[in-house]
Image (cartoon, grey):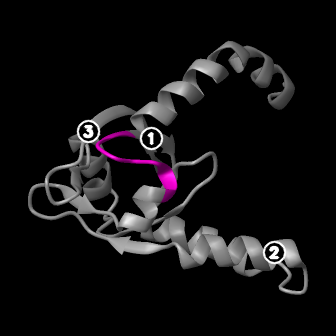
Amino acid sequence: MFYGEYEHSLDKKGRFIIPSRFREVAKNNYIEKFFVTRGLDKCLFMFGEEEWKSQELKFKNLSFTKKESRNFNRLFFSGTTEVEFDKQGRILIPKYLKDYAGIKRDAMLIGVSSRIEIWSKEIWQEFYKTQQGSFEEIAERLITE
C-alpha cells in the first residue's frame, strides 16, 4: 500500500504535505482520515482508518491486568490524534507528537506497507545509517523458506 521515502519540511504553521503518491493510495483505498500516534524508535505511526481499527482491536485485547499492557496502551492511545488532508494535501500534527519524534523542521515520511511512519530527518538518517548494514542478517533471522 504505502511505499517509499519522502522528505518534506514543515511550513510556517507547522503543517507538512503528504506525498502525492500516499494521497493517491489513500484516495484509491477510500481512506479519508488517518490516526497518528507515538510509534516506536522515536517516530510517529500514521494509520488509515481501517488499519487503525485493526491495530486498536489488537491492543485493546491486551490484558489490562498486566502493567506493561496498561502502560503501552496509555502511551499509545493517549498520544493519538485524528487527521485529514486539507485541499493542498497537508496535515497538522500536534506539537506534543512532533516533540516526541524530534521533528523541528524537516521530516521523512516512510511508507511501511499498511502504515506511514513520520520521522525527524536527522533521526531517520541515523537509524538508516546504523541499520542498513544489518539488513541481510535481519532477513536471514526473520525470513524462513
Give the secondary structure at mark 1.
strand
Q: Which mark, by number, is residue 8?
A: 3
Amino acid carrying label 2: it is Ser
Residue 105 colored in magenta in the image: yes
Residue labelled with disc 1: 111
Q: Which residue is nearer to you in this view: 49 or 18? A: 18
State left or right for residue 1 relative to residue 66: left
Q: Quadrant of residue 107?
A: top left
Distance Cα–Cα, label 3 vs label 1: 14 Å
Which quadrant of the figure contains the C terminus? top right
Image position, residue 94 (x, y; %): 35, 68
Residue 47 at least partly seen: no
Mark 2 or mark 1: whose residue is earlier in sequence: 2
Looking at the image, tell me whether mark 3 or mark 1 is earlier in sequence order.
Answer: 3
Amino acid tagged 1: Gly
**Disc 2 marks which residue?**
69
- Distance, label 2 to label 1, CA atoms, is 27 Å
